[in-house]
Each structure stands twice: as structure tokens, then as C-alpha cells.
Image: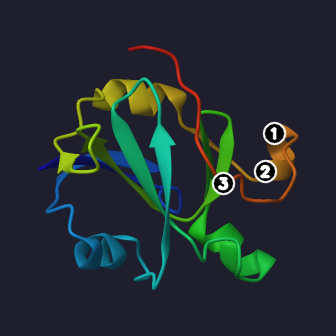
Amino acid sequence: MRAILINPATQTIEEVDHSGAAPDIRATLTPPSNFFTVSVLHGLDAVLYVDDEGWLYEDNVIAERGYFFFGGTAYAGPALLIGDDGKGESVDAKVPLAFVQKHVKWGAPDAAGAVKSRVLGECKFYEL
């Protein structure tokens, strides 16, 4: 299925073909993550899978893995955006690649005035 991979280490955002299965999501979040957090992206009919261990590394490792902001939330490490059918099933991401490229901001949390903490829960977005 169509998904979007956000890689802050290389500052790239690309469309990928993905199964949406949990083991494949773990493998995609390089280095492979044992755990991931799911952020519901309201208004986008999508979810963002993020390395749940991203903030647990030492600052120098987090800096190497990279940071990004999306929907007002700071994330550490890579993320995978997959569509959601509203019933908990993964589907093709409907979010245009250009939309994600426009709204992802690269940089460390302190550079944007954010506190170094992970914001859990739901992200609020506007309509496409």
C-alpha cells in the first residue's frame, strides 16, 4: 500500500510501498525499533508510526537520527505515514506527498522553541 516515509537523518520524504504490518513497520523505522508510537492525524485519514525509542537515546545519537516537526509535534527519528480507514485498518495514504513535504520542518526541538519532550496523543490537522 502507499505510505510516506519521513527520514530526518537524511532530511528526505518519499513515497514507499508498504505492507502496513507491525513487523514491517518496526523494520522500516531504522535502526529497527522494538516499539513504535502511533499518532492519529485527524483530518488526514492517516496515522503516523514513529520510533517510540527515539527520545530515549543520548542527545548526540538523537541528533544523528534527526528531528522533525509535523502538525505542531516534535519527533525524533524516522516515521511512516499510512492511511487509516477509520476502523483501525491500514489503507493507502491519501495525503499528497507535496502536503507532507510542505508541512514537515527539520531541526532540533530547541531550534523551534519546543520543549525536549515527546508529545503523545492526537495531533490536530486542518483539512487538505
> What residue type is disc 2 on?
Pro
Q: CA distance from mark 3 to mark 2?
A: 15 Å
Q: CA distance from mark 3 to mark 1?
A: 18 Å
Point out residue 5 in the picture as x, y percentages from the top left corner: 34, 53
Q: Give the numbered dot on residue 125.
A: none
Q: Give the numbered dot on residue 109.
A: 2
Q: Residues within 10 Å of mark 2 (few under 14, many from 20)?
A: some
93 sits left or right of 73 in the view = left
From the viewer's side, name the closer residue of 84 and 64: 84
Q: Give the numbered dot on residue 120.
A: 3
Q: Give the numbered dot on residue 112.
A: 1
Secondary structure category for the residue under label 1: helix
Q: CA distance from mark 1 to mark 2?
A: 5 Å
Point out residue 26 in the picture as x, y percentages from the top left corner: 35, 76
Q: Residues within 10 Å of mark 1 (few under 14, many from 20)?
A: few
Q: Earlier in the sequence, mark 3 or mark 2?
A: 2
